Amino acid sequence: MKTITGAIAVEGKHIVKDFQIGNTTTKVLKDISLQVMQREFVSIMGPSGSGKSTLLYILGGLDAPTSGQIMLNGTDISRFDDEKMSRIRRQKIGFVFQFYNLIPNLNVEENIMLPLLLDGKKMGSYKKQLDEILELVGLSERRKHTPRELSGGQQQRVAIARALIGKPEILFADEPTGNLDSKTGAEIMSLLREINQSSGQTIIMVTHSPEAVKSTSRVITVQDGVIQKCV
Amino acid sequence: MKIIMKYILTNVKERKTRTAVMLLSILLSTTLLFVSFSIGASYESAQRKMARGMAGSATVSVEAADGAIDKNAIPELKSIKFCVGVLEGLALYHENGYYETMDLIAAHLTELNQTNPPRLADGGEISDLSGNQVILPDRFTSKYGIEKGDTIILQIGGEPITLEVAGVAAYDTVFLRHTRGATALLPISTLRELLGQTGGYSKILMEPADAVSTSELKNELSAALPGGEYQVSEVVNEAQITADARQKSMPFFLISFFSLTMSVFIIYSSYKVITLDRLPVIGTFRSIGATQSNVTRILLLESALYGCLGGVLGIPVGTVVLKLILRGMGQSLSQGIEIPVVISPFSILFSFSVALIVSLLSAWIPVRRASRLPVKEVVLGTVEEKQVPRPVIVGIGLVLFAASVILPKLASGNMLYIAGGFSLLGLIAATILIVPLLTNLLSAGMERLYGGIFGNEGRLAARNMRDNKNIIQNITLLFISISAVIAITVVGNFVTTYVSDVFNGAELEGFADGYMEPEFVEQVKEMDGMEKVLPVYVFENQMQGNGLTFTRLEATDNVEWYSSMLALHYTKSGMKEQTVSAFSEERAVLLSESCMEQMGVSVGDMITLTNGTGQSEYRVAGSFKSRATDVEAVIPSRYAEIDFGASVYDFLAYTAADPDAVMVQIRDLFGETSNWSRTVEEFNTDALSTVGAFLQPMHSMTYFILLLATVGIINNLLINYIQKRRTIAMYKSVGLSNKQNRKMTLIEGFSSGLIGAAIAIFVSYMEVQTIFLVAGPKISTVPELDAGVFLSAGAMGIVVTLIGSVVPIFKSRQMKLVEEIKFE
């Protein structure tokens, strides 16, 4: 196993996740424990149905574990109520999805600013930050466009910008290149790598792509609900 | 086929809520359509019955030119189904200063029972009537506290005659009348004796045989009877009765129109979502070789299933509702007119067909569109809806709106009805096209406003409404529903007022009808609290103008007061002033619009008035219509005195601080002189007792349309939630809390309710204008619109939308976030 140094960004302790389908209970995650350090760029791999995405969503607070703890900067978030968890999503976590999940009738600027707006911030006060992030993702010229007027790669850039606008402690990405062609996928990975290297942004990413894995510092392989290897 | 049916039934079972809402909307639409048609028909039939009054099913009358007519005089014709001889007389009833004119009628009961059977108030039949017995209608006995077994005194031919009340009849059949007073039924031998007649009848009423029209029978009789000795006439003007009945049942047909429009919209919007939902299955079907028509057939079969079930269930439910409504009416009119329950095979077939056709057609457009999509796009889930450029849509909407407003104003005659129908549909269709633009403009304004009031959640809620198809759909349904409720309420209230309050808008508070010398009028003027007194000379069937006999010509010394007292609506603005000036300067005559049309004269023309004793030229000063009076012509009093020798007033209208106190004094002043004097309040109470309960079903139907609207809105909000689920999940994934979601959903619900209500108020105002423009030539009053009706319906719409928002709020609390956002 690779030696990790520095402060822990997120830690999963004995995570178990069961799914009930009819009368059958399926154990998707079987007592998983892991730590991700600050500034790390970690990828989670594994075959379909291995539980990698479920692990990501549990670590990112979008799903709750059946048992176990999620420690975010030393605080257990696994039993937070809706109000506290929503605040964590707005302030501490950024999420990038395979299908972008942009609000179709909001334009690029509004989509990016959404976490801040939900946090009660004024759009005008964050103009500089917005300009910088648009510059970073290369969409300054398309700020007034709606998602349906953008290509898949551009939509994913908007999703990345939205995930980063609140300066989150961790960026979670669920197969960010899964819906893109290889060239655009490579561009997105290059952007994520740049974000990790230039600002030290912690990133945890689920991927199927061996190409995408090359950009990350550590690879965790999940199979049948357990961590098979961590390199 | 078996597999397809299984697939359809599985769909129906799996989507329980949606199936229930779809079925409920079709069922309610069918019920509403069936009830409104049947009530409309029942109402029309009752109206006909009232208009025919004592004639019943007889439509032709034969009278002798002089005196009585013998039944033997009527030739035996195959065209006659049966005939009844009716003897008529007049009487006067006097009680505590009240005078009531009474028509006495008599006929052989066996004959009468064939054409127009009288009905006792307790439901029984009149089987025997003899000696000095009389049967009086409940409307009369209850007014004067008369009961069965009492004796009453009637003045017949100037002699007081004591009669025993043998029974109290319902205000129905022979007792129905459309003029003031009451009708009393006597044994034929008694009435003959009282009138001093030895035989014969006043007239013979006849019903044509089946397949023989009234005019055919009339012509045949005219040809068969010796000319000059007999007068053959139609009992009632069928065309007029039909027109009147249609006018009064208009609200029910309006209810049908709106319920149909709402059903189409509800089912269409549901199917749009269903087909969207089924796109993956459509893709699968197409990829394994199903043709476009296969897919269309499968999806249409499902809608046919909803249509058939809704239609089949809607008719029995409608029948129960119809009976409940009519029973309610029956109870409140227990001693009044019996309302026939008309359930025609047409209304059953029509309602069922509409349910099926509306279901199929509403589904056909989205289904056809879905089945025509390229297979690859459907399978890959890359289908994008084709957008028609907005300027084109808005342009069409604006043109349609303008046409809907202008056309009824330009049309006349029968074209007016066509233009009116086009306008009602056009206004709704045009607004549907303009709603997206309006919503965007209004939500842009709200975004700024809400930012300040509700913070970022308010701003986002308003922002979410822009270009949001679900919200637009909600607003559309809401505006259709609210405008339906408003239009029906306004028209319903108007009809109630129109039918029950003929003095609506008239200034007079009381009137006296009797022999009044000028000194009498002076004494009335001196009474305490008297404000305005308007004495009028009346010439009934005495005066002729250009060869036409006026049924009523009146003369007044103050045409300005006359106009306001009797709510005259002049044909053109400025005509009132012209008339006032002409009346003070010359021999002027004011004509009713119908009279003017009949005479073929115009303002400024000269007509010759004559009553046999005098003759003079009068200039036509203006024309009018009025609900408060059936006068055909009005002239200045001083010329009525000079030219026609008028000296005694016959009618007097007044306003006073206490109209009741004045009425007591007027009755006292009349003493034993026959008169008919009432305050307007007394008159209206009388009128309302007859028609008030009759109009009740209209209000019941308004609740029904509201129920349909609520089901539609909840259906839409559910559809909205189904489509919005993923967006809510996206918001939640970036930090939207349940509390914030609740706030945003409620703001969104309130705002769409507000926009829908505002549009509905405007559209219904335009629709009401169209309705009254079309009805205008038939009615003589201008409807007063109550802002309260518009505002309360709007508020109700907002409340319904807010209540409907509760379901999505609760559903999104239990949402499984990952399931919603993981897959596209």
Image (tube, coloured by chain):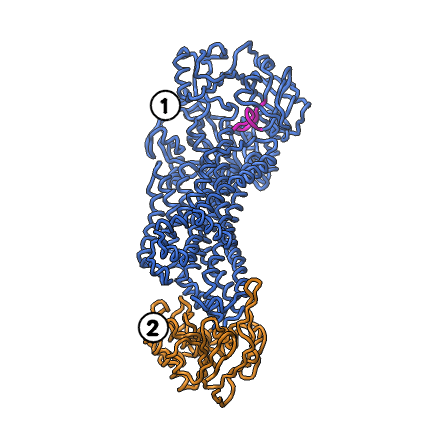
Chain colours: A orange, B blue
Front-lying residue, B281 or B393: B281
Residue for point 42% across, 22% down: B211
Identify the element where label 1 is drawn: loop
Mark nearest the camera among 2 and 1 is 2
Residue density around tag 2, few if under 14, some if 14–19, many if 20 or more, within 10 Å: few
* Number of numbered callouts drawn: 2
Residue B627 pos. (x, y %): 47, 36
Residue A156 pos. (x, y %): 38, 74
Residue type at numbered disc 2: Asp
Using the image, tell me which numbered label, if any, was put on residue A181: 2
Residue type at numbered disc 1: Gly
Give the position of the C terminus of chain B as an image quadrant: bottom left
Identify the element where label 2 is drawn: loop
Residue B132 pos. (x, y %): 64, 16
Could you tell me which chain the residue with mark 2 belongs to? A
User: In which quadrant of the rendered view does residue A110 lie?
Assistant: bottom left
Residue for point 46% across, 83% down: A202
Front-lying residue, B205 or B780: B205
Name the residue that disc number 1 marks: B547
Residue B113 pos. (x, y %): 56, 20
Height in image: B707 above or below A209?
above
Height in image: B202 above or below B609?
above
Apparent side of residue B246 relative to residue B416 in the rendered image (left or right): right
Front-lying residue, B387 or B364: B364
Whether labels 2 and 1 belong to a single chain: the reply is no
User: In which quadrant of the rendered view does residue B585 lie?
Assistant: top left
Asked if residue B460 can be seen in this view, the reply is yes
Mark 2 and mark 1 residues within 8 Å of each other at the beta carbon: no
> In this picture, which residue range is highlighted in magenta?
B171-184
User: In which quadrant of the rendered view does residue B526 lie?
Assistant: top right
Residue A50 in the magenta stretch? The answer is no
